Image (cartoon, rainbow, N blue to C red):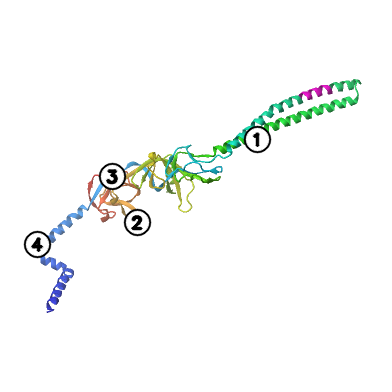
């Protein structure tokens, strides 16, 4: 009963042997007649013979170089133009309702308000001290004028005593007394001057006290330094604020910065003021200008930081989004070719195969500028070139080709 499976296995083995090891003989046997087989062999030889003189068939394009903007492409992220943590500059208890994070505030809006306490009374006291100090000035000026008058009187008496003493009409004692009176008058002037200077210093001290009291009152209202979004809640109602305690963190997103890093080989192509574009992960594209190029490389990556400032009306772009940044530079000649036309030579160099004047294939190394949806922009080719776009992998330098040309892109 087991003989049929054995026979089946033998037949399958025989068929596999014929297919694998006797394929040519099997195909020859399958032909309709020996005459047809001979005719097919002759036809193949004729086709091969006709193909040899005409070269290898390839598809090529006639490409002409175009002037394009040479761009530097880098990966980066969005970053707020400004970010600051607003802190208290005095001590006090919060008396205002808190603002919640995400709220938009304008420059000058009050974020936190503190209890004034006795600061109003301190201001009135300082203002009273200023008025008192200012009242001392007229008195000190009058005393100085009186002292100057005494000096002039003492000088007159001293001169008279000297003339009388020289003529022998007065005693030496009276002359000494006149000199003492003159010195006393001069000392009185100095004292009056000191009093006036002290009064003026008192005014300045009183003015400083008034300014300090006014500043303390002004610091009770903590305001937004610029328009932006609250990144945190403001301080809670009733909380005690010390000097340096955070009230809130605010960020400015309009305009917004695109921060990227350019390698040292391309940093010379980027300059402040250059036009730039950025493409976000959601496909949104924005335009701006380069506002900063670092002149110090990162110690680890050897790259230079580049900042591009772009408008952000409506705050549609958030802080921290990934972006592809393209910075334009001086234009240069380049060819637009299909990405599939590029190939590698035996040394691993990237290039294309072109057709020279003798209809032979020639490999030319290229430099890839950038990829686009339409193709790749490359340089280092002649201004005009016949580039093989199909079949370049099947020919080498010096091989005769039979090109069929198609229209180039661009």
- Label 4 crowd (10 A; few <14 / some 14-19 / many >=20): few
Mark 4 vs 3, N-terminal side: 4
Which one is closest to the eye, mark 4 or mark 2?
Answer: 2
Look at the image and give the residue range highlighted in magenta.
148-158
Q: Closest to the observer: 84 or 238?
A: 238
Quick check: is 151 in the magenta stretch? yes
Query: Residue 392, labelled with which disc?
Result: none
Mark 3 vs 2, N-terminal side: 3
Give coordinates of residue 189: x percent, y percent: 76, 28
Q: Which residue is under mark 2?
A: 348
- Label 3 crowd (10 A; few <14 / some 14-19 / many >=20): many
Mark 4 vs 1, N-terminal side: 4
Question: Left or right: 319 with respect to 42?
Answer: right
Q: CA distance from mark 2 to mark 1?
A: 82 Å
Element assignment for label 1: helix
Which one is closest to the eye, mark 3 or mark 1?
Answer: 1
Give coordinates of residue 267: x percent, y percent: 44, 46
Q: Which residue is under mark 4?
A: 36
Q: Which residue is under mark 1?
A: 205
Q: CA distance from mark 3 to mark 2?
A: 24 Å
Q: CA distance from mark 4 to mark 2?
A: 47 Å
Q: Is residue 267 above or below residue 154?
A: below
Give coordinates of residue 314: x percent, y percent: 38, 39
Question: Looking at the rendering, which quadrant does residue 79 occupy?
Answer: top left
Q: Which residue is under mark 3?
A: 63
Tell me the quarter of the image containing the C terminus: top left
Quick check: is 225 in the magenta stretch? no
The residue lying at 23 percent from left, 46 percent from top is 406
Circles 4 and 2 in contact, beta carbons < 8 Å? no
Element assignment for label 4: helix
Q: CA distance from mark 4 to mark 1?
A: 123 Å
- Label 2 crowd (10 A; few <14 / some 14-19 / many >=20): few
């Amino acid at each position: 009963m087991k003989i049929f499976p054995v026979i089946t296995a033998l037949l399958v083995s025989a068929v596999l042997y014929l297919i694998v090891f006797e394929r040519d003989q099997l195909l020859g046997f399958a032909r309709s007649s020996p005459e047809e087989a001979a005719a097919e062999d002759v036809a193949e030889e004729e086709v091969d013979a006709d193909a040899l003189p005409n070269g290898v068939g390839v598809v090529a394009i006639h490409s002409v170089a175009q002037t394009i903007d040479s761009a530097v492409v880098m990966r980066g992220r969005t970053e707020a133009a400004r970010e600051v943590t607003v802190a208290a500059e005095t001590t006090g208890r919060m008396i205002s309702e808190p603002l919640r994070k995400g709220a938009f505030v304008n420059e000058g809006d009050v974020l936190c308000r503190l209890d004034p306490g006795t600061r109003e009374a301190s201001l009135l006291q300082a203002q009273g001290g200023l008025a008192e100090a200012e009242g001392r000035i007229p008195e000190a000026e009058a005393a100085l004028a009186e002292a100057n008058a005494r000096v002039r009187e003492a000088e007159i008496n001293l001169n008279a005593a000297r003339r009388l003493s020289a003529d022998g009409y007065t005693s030496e004692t009276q002359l000494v007394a006149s000199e003492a009176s003159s010195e006393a008058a001069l000392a009185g002037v100095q004292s009056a001057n000191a009093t006036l200077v002290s009064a003026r210093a008192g005014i300045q001290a009183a003015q400083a006290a008034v300014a300090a009291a006014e500043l303390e009152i002004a610091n009770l209202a903590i305001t937004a330094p610029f328009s932006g979004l609250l990144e945190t809640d403001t301080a809670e109602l009733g909380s005690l604020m010390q000097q340096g305690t955070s009230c809130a963190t605010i960020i400015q997103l309009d305009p917004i910065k695109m921060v990227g890093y350019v390698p040292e080989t391309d940093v010379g192509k980027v300059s402040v003021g250059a036009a730039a574009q950025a493409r976000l992960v959601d496909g949104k594209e924005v335009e701006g200008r380069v506002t900063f190029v670092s002149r110090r490389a990162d110690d680890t990556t050897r790259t230079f930081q580049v900042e591009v400032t772009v408008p952000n009306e409506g705050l549609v772009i958030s802080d921290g989004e990934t972006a592809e940044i393209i910075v334009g530079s001086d234009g240069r000649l380049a060819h637009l070719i299909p990405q599939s036309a590029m190939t590698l030579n035996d040394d691993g160099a990237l290039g294309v195969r072109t057709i020279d004047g003798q209809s032979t294939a020639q490999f030319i190394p290229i430099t890839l500028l950038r990829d686009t949806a339409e193709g790749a922009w490359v340089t280092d080719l002649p201004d005009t070139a016949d580039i093989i776009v199909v079949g370049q992998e099947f020919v080498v330098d010096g091989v005769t080709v039979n090109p069929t040309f198609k229209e180039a892109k661009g």
